[in-house]
Image (cartoon, rainbow, N blue to C red):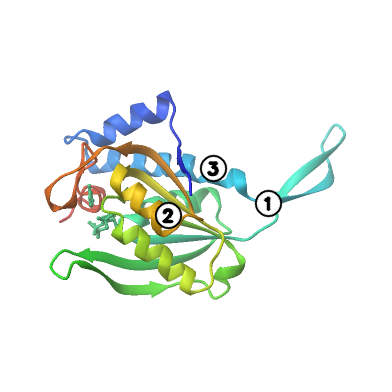
Amino acid sequence: MTLRLVNNAIMMDKLGTLRQAETEPDTFRRIIGELSVQLFFAAASELPFSEREICTPISTATVRKVSKEISLISVMRAGNGMLEAILHVWPKSSVGHIGIYRDKFLNNTVEYYCKTPGHLSDTAVFVMDPIIATGDTAIASVSRLKDMGCRDISFLSIVTSALGKDLFREAHPDVNLYAVSCDDELVEDGYIKPGLGDVGARFYNSK
Ligand SMILES: O=P(O)(O)OC[C@H]1O[C@H](OP(=O)(O)OP(=O)(O)O)[C@H](O)[C@@H]1O
Ligand SMILES: O=c1cc[nH]c(=O)[nH]1
């Protein structure tokens, strides 16, 4: 697995706004969506395509069509914020939802929901969750997808911790991870520093 950092001056400017504690939920949501689309486009550079001849208004041209079906898998709940924006740019995707969280008392992950497309293993699977902190949730989500037969998996995340990235790579060396930032530290309660805070709570203006 490689961590591909997808960032440029504009994306970093937007990430800075996301990091600011006083950023309002409407702006927070919009930027999560914008950055998610950039991650999806970067990850899509690995997709297979076929070529065909078409007529433009001026001449003929050889154009490319994506030749593999795409599945988008949201790790709830914060993954839903990325899903919405990506679905908007590739509406013919199939969509699945996985509900997995890290239970700090059990010191394990707990799955509470899983609904995915039936033909998932034949598709290019893009899993999304804005945060990889300890890595437990991302690792468990990808393991679940592999149990269903998925082999072509990319993981999209806005911010990963360095530790989470390393543990993810150990667990799933065959999965490419795309992120806007890799932050150095994890603090008490498993939050990334500087990070984004509680992303689900900030996205939904909720607890
Ligand atoms: O790498 P980990 O240590 O497992 O932490 C990352 C998880 O934490 C956040 O979700 P959270 O559990 O806060 O749930 P939410 O999406 O419902 O807010 C985030 O969206 C990841 O799913
Ligand atoms: O930094 C973190 C860690 C876990 N969950 C979040 O929402 N943020």
Inter-mark Cα distance, 1 to 3: 13 Å
Residue type at tag 1:
Pro
Disc 2 target residue: 83
Q: Earlier in the sequence, mark 2 or mark 1?
A: 1
Q: From this viewpoint, which residue is outermost toward the top?
A: 9
* Ligand 1 in which quarter: bottom left
The residue that appears at 70% across and 56% down in the rendered structure is 67
Residue 100 percent location from the top left of the image: 30, 67
Q: From this viewpoint, which residue is outermost toward the front?
A: 170
Residue type at tag 2:
Leu
Q: Is mark 1 within 8 Å of ligand 1?
A: no
Inter-mark Cα distance, 2 to 1: 22 Å
Q: Could you say which disc has been placed on residue 48 in the image?
A: 1
Residue type at tag 3:
Phe
Residue 38 percent location from the top left of the image: 48, 39
2 vs 1, front mark: 1
Task: From the viewer's perspective, tell me whether residue 87 is left or right of residue 179.
Answer: right
Q: Is mark 2 within 8 Å of ligand 1?
A: no
